Image (spheres, rainbow, N blue to C red):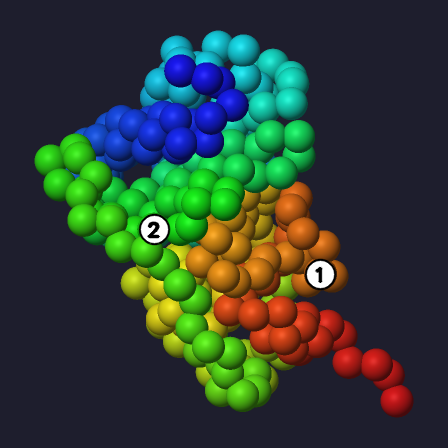
Amino acid sequence: MRTGDRHHDLDLALAAALSGAELGLRYFHRVQELAREHKLDGSVVTAADLAVEEQVRAVLRAARPDDAFLGEETGELGAGRRRWILDGIDGIDGTLVFVEGDDRWQTLIALEEDGAVTVGVAIVPAQGQVWYAARGRGAFVADVVEGCVTGARRLRVGGPPESLRAARTAVLPPVAMVPGRYRAEVDRLVGAADVADWRVHGALLVAAGELDLAVQVGGKVWDYAPLALIVAEAGGVFGGDDGRPHPVTGTGVFACDARTAERARAALAPRPEA
């Protein structure tokens, strides 16, 4: 097996995601028993976050011992041109989705090579689905049945909306949970777009053509890396609120096309003073 083969790297990432999902579901089924702590940024963390991330990293490291790793909970390990970026339990709103028993939590895995993301996986264990992509090979969603990936369907973004007002838009975290530092920009976006509910991360729904735009605030590189590739391989675009591509922290914009992304960034930006 060649270390740099994206096909094999994707297979490995999917195997790691399935292993982490199995463990994550065991925690999820007794989530009310888990002790909750708050990190310095105010987000909630449980033993499940660290355990799932460690499990995913163990699977990847066993097959790729020379690769570097960056995890939200486990931090950095090693250095080099290949780096796996992990988020064991991404609750989209600081793990609150997970601890409140909501099935939209996900586990995220990305492989970054020479600074570019080449493999991305987002598994939603409680919904039995996995979304994935490898650079140049397209993006897909498949079912997870008894620990196996089956029934893969290719993803493709929808056609561009006529205006931002017509754009089917997801805001993450939910508008009511947006941190105060991002409240003004989110309020500007909500006033300009058609904000919709989301059954999984809005970026995945953009990739599937079900939404036109998804904007997440307060995200880090591990939140965005795999989702950015999935959207790009489905024909969409990703960048920060300043248009900068990966890596992005803070506000991330996923869109079906560049024009919609540009309109979203304009709506997010402060109004010039008269």
Mark 2 residue type? Phe
Of 192 and 185, nearer the camera is 192
Q: Which residue is mark 2?
A: 140
Quadrant occupied by the C terminus: bottom right
Q: Which element type, helix, strand or loop, lies under badge 2?
A: strand
Of 162 and 77, nearer the camera is 162
The spot of residue 4 in percent (x, y) is 51, 23
What residue lies at 42% left-to-right and 50% top-to-bottom? 138
Look at the picture and state if 143 lies above or below 262: above
> Can you see residue 181?
no
Disc 1 packing (10 Å; few <14; some 14–19; many ≥20): some
What residue lies at 71% left-to-right and 61% top-to-bottom? 243
Q: Which element type, helix, strand or loop, lies under badge 1?
A: loop
Q: Residue furthest left?
A: 146
Left or right for 7, reference 273: left
Q: Which residue is mark 1?
A: 243
The spot of residue 119 in percent (x, y) is 47, 37
Left or right for 192, reference 227: right
